[in-house]
Image (cartoon, coloured by chain):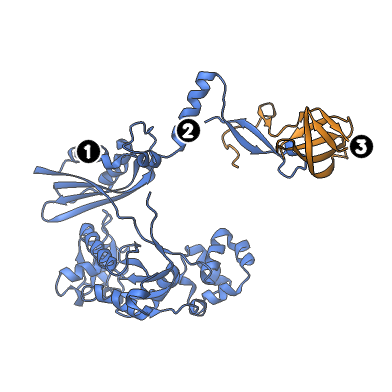
Chain colours: A blue, B orange
């Protein structure tokens, strides 16, 4: 598999409330009114709330009736996840013009690798300016620059809309020390416990001995301490150019029956699995886009916990999503996309197209099959594991032993 | 070196690695190996002694790392308790 490009210098590009901003961008005048976006599921609760609406007391998670009760002039928008996704993809493509190393975070958050860009643009200020140039006019972004993703994210979160915060090399410790602990990736319980201990800033956390924090909070505590102390420099990891596999189906007449839609999805999965580019890869992420009557869209982004090349296992979570949150109308077109893959497949790659594909297919499964075959033929195992017995022994024959390899 | 997670360890299925095997050794006047089988010892590189497990059945070995005629490197030891000689991988 090609190695993914990385960069320790990072610029964080953050557009808070990205989906809401997408709606404001395509509907004139929306930005001047209190606005809320409904959740993409069937809960009919609020997902994102504009600052104007928030000012009247409206909060995400409220029901529509609660929100209207608080703010009668609230404008509600139906979500269009496909549109947001397309806009975000365009943003990433624009950032790619500045740096080849771009890592997407959640919607509206992306990291741009800065290693080597000094030679092209010059100082960090100039690099940040170049990033602003490609997104300016479309988005009002907050930009942060620093060593590693965490520092750049904290810097972006401190920046005002349309501005940037640059943390010079060596200044990370001083910058982080003054930041509130809320910038750490904390669960509510850890946040509460830290506050109960009187720890309000990263500086206060970093001032504690690492061992003491680890003893109190375990591995999570150690991770948090290292972030707070600026010891963790998480690099930006760019994506290897994706090679998604797409299968699409257009219905002659719009289809509303779920059974028919499910069957069509099965067909699309089978067709996509047969694509020769899939050989040697298991599917990890699937995206299903349904174009719905009336110009609306429906999107299901599925991340498979266990990557698979089995059609039924790929279809199962999509069917569940279809049951729980079906498209809000008859479907005119379905587009299935395998967007991410994991190397290796559980099938033996006897007919892999080349040695690279065979290597991708993973080593473990063929090895286990081969070991089983040898055992069946010779009635005994001829493969062994070397295990440690007394590795400290001064007598060489006591240190290691062989044990049958049993797959 | 990874212990096989799914394989239960049973003493009867373990095979020791690097087990010493007996060899015929003749020594010189200083009790240093002179021949191993029919092959002459060219050089004795190093000699050392191991005293172990004195708390149960004491194991005492005198090791010699030698170069045989022809250039082969061998590690030999004499079991002091029995006077027998063995070869073992270094």
10 Å crowding of disc 3: few (<14), some (14-19), many (20+): few
Residue farthest to the right? Answer: B29
Q: Is residue B22 left or right of residue A268?
A: right
Residue A251 x %, y %: 11, 43
Which residue is tagged 2? A367
Q: Residue at x 58, y 71 (%)?
A: A197
Pair 3/2: label in front: 3
Q: Chain of mark 3?
A: B
Q: Chain of mark 1?
A: A
Q: Residue at x 69, y 29 (%)?
A: B11
Quick check: A141 above or below B66? below
The disc at residue A271 is: 1
How many angstroms separate mark 3 from mark 2 (CA)?
A: 55 Å
Q: Residue at x 33, y 71 (%)?
A: A13
**Is the Cβ of the residue at disc 1 closer than 8 Å to that at disc 2?**
no
10 Å crowding of disc 2: few (<14), some (14-19), many (20+): few
10 Å crowding of disc 1: few (<14), some (14-19), many (20+): some
**Is the Cβ of the residue at disc 3 closer than 8 Å to that at disc 2?**
no
The disc at residue A65 is: none
Q: Residue at x 35, y 80 (%)?
A: A125
Of the numbered discs 1 and 2, the one sitting upstream in the chain is 1
Residue A300 x %, y %: 26, 50
Q: Chain of mark 2?
A: A
Quick check: A75 above or below A326? below
Residues at marks 1 and 2 on the same chain: yes
The disc at residue B29 is: 3
Residue A97 x %, y %: 27, 68
Label 1 element class: helix
Report if residue B54 is visible in the image: yes
Quadrant of residue A313 within the rendered picture: top left
Quadrant of residue A229 within the rendered picture: bottom right
Instruction: Looking at the picture, tell me which residue is in the foreground, A226 or A193.
Output: A226
């Amino acid at each position: 598999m090609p190695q993914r490009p990385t960069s320790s210098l990072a610029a964080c590009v953050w557009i808070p409330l990205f989906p809401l901003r997408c709606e404001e961008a395509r509907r004139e005048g929306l930005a001047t009114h209190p606005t809320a976006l409904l959740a993409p599921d069937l809960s009919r609760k609020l997902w994102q709330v504009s600052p104007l609406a928030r000012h009247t007391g409206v909060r995400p998670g409220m029901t529509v009736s609660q929100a209207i009760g608080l703010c009668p002039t609230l404008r509600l928008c139906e979500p269009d996840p496909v549109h947001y996704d397309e806009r975000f993809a365009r943003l990433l493509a624009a950032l790619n013009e500045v740096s080849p190393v771009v890592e997407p975070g959640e919607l509206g958050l992306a990291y741009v690798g800065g290693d080597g860009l000094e030679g092209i643009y010059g100082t960090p200020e100039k690099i940040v300016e170049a990033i602003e140039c490609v997104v300016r006019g479309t988005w009002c972004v907050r930009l942060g620059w620093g060593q590693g993703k965490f520092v750049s994210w904290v810097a972006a979160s401190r920046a005002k809309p349309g501005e940037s915060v640059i943390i010079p090399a060596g200044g990370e410790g001083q910058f982080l020390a003054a930041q509130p602990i809320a910038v750490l990736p904390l669960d509510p319980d850890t946040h509460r416990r830290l506050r109960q201990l009187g720890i309000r800033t990263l500086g206060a956390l970093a001032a504690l001995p690492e061992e003491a924090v680890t003893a109190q909070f375990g591995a999570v505590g150690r991770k948090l301490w290292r972030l707070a102390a600026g010891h963790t420099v998480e690099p930006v990891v760019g994506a290897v150019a994706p090679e998604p596999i797409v299968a699409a189906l257009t219905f002659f007449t719009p289809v509303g029956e779920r059974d028919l839609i499910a069957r069509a999805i099965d067909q699309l999965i089978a067709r996509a699995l047969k694509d020769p580019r899939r050989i040697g890869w298991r599917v990890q992420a699937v995206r299903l886009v349904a174009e719905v009557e009336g110009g609306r869209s429906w999107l299901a982004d599925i991340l498979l916990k266990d990557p698979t090349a089995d059609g039924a296992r790929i279809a199962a979570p999509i069917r569940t999503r279809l049951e729980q949150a079906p498209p809000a109308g008859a479907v005119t077109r379905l587009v299935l996309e395998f967007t991410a893959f994991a190397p290796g497949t559980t099938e033996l790659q006897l007919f892999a197209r080349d040695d690279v594909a065979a290597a991708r297919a993973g080593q473990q499964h063929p090895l286990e099959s081969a070991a089983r075959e040898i055992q069946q033929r010779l009635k005994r195992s001829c493969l062994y594991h070397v295990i440690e017995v007394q590795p400290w022994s001064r007598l060489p024959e006591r240190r290691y032993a062989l044990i049958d390899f049993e797959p | 070196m990874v212990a096989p997670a799914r394989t239960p360890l049973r003493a009867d299925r373990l095979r020791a690695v690097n087990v010493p095997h007996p060899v015929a050794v003749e020594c010189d006047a200083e009790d240093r190996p002179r021949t191993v089988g029919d092959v002459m010892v060219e050089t004795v590189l190093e000699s050392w002694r191991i005293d172990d497990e004195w708390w149960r059945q004491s194991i005492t070995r005198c090791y010699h790392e030698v170069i045989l005629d022809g250039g082969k490197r061998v590690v030999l030891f004499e079991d002091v308790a029995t006077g027998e000689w063995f070869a073992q991988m270094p």
